[in-house]
Image (cartoon, rainbow, N blue to C red):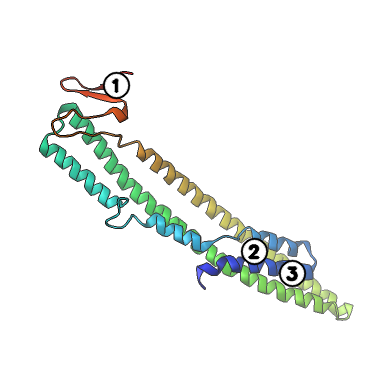
Amino acid sequence: MAYENDVRLFTASVAATVVAAGLLRSKQALAIPVALGLLVSNPASMKKAAEGWCDQGKENSPENLDRITADIKNLKKQVKENKHWEGEAAETFNTAADSFLAALSDNKRYRQAAGECAGQTGDAYHAAAVFASYVAATMLTLGAAFQAARLLPPLVGVPVQVAILQIVNKINAVVNAVVKRKTVLVAAAATIFAAVNTLQIGHQALFFGMKTLPGQTPDFTQAGLRYQKGTGISPKPR
């Protein structure tokens, strides 16, 4: 079944278990649709998000991490060959460039890990949608059997109803266990995404603004610094 149908499958399953709970008339039966409601999600969106995290950008895209890495390396090479910067200015640029290259490598690796995590979460919730549909079908069958047992003589019908309610209790326990595992999975995924997002925000500050033109003084103003030949880099006066 396509992931795009999972939301409808979740919704239909919860609705079916509500009907079944009305037929079964027990607290445990009523708890099942509530628990299944906690599983309702959109696995298709999770898989799409996973593709976005894993996608490093098309080859010609300015967001392509490999292309950015190559551009930074080429810039370092050009600066060295053309001797635009010397002394501390060149050293500072090389240090910043090296730090940025290392950050790009980490960024690519962590984005890949986050994408794989999102994909696995989507797979898990797709399986949960199928599980919810099985629970709904079983609950409706049990609900119908419970109502049919009411038409039987008490000596026969009551034991059947008791047996059905025992099965419902077991289903409730299983559903709660599944919900708990999925909740832990989502919490772990959220932690990973938050860490990666924080990492990327931190990386934005690594490669501060520096520009220069042939024959002109390097500009470090965006970093709050200034470069003076002979004395090197110092804080920019306010």
Question: Can you give x and y, in whole percent of width and height, for residue 133 in the image?
Answer: 62, 71
Mark 2 or mark 1: name the one nearer the start of the chain. 2
Instruction: Name the image quarter holding residue 163.
Output: bottom right
Question: Can you give x and y, in whole percent of width and height, for residue 131 in the image?
Answer: 59, 68
Horizontal side of 161 relative to 11 (left or right) equals right
Question: Can you give x and y, in whole percent of width and height, for residue 147 in the image?
Answer: 81, 76
Residue kind at label 1, given as amino acid type: Pro
Residue drawn at (46%, 48%) of the image: 193
Q: Which of marks 1 and 3 is in front?
A: 1
Instruction: Name the image quarter holding residue 56.
Output: bottom left
CB of mark 1 within 8 Å of CB of mark 3?
A: no
Residue kind at label 2, given as amino acid type: Val
Question: Can you give x and y, in whole percent of width and height, for residue 24 in the image?
Answer: 78, 69
Of helix, strand and loop, which one carries label 1?
strand
Of helix, strand and loop, which one carries label 2?
helix
Mark 1 or mark 3: name the one nearer the start of the chain. 3
Residue kind at label 3, given as amino acid type: Val
Residue that carries the numbered disc 1 in the rendered image = 235
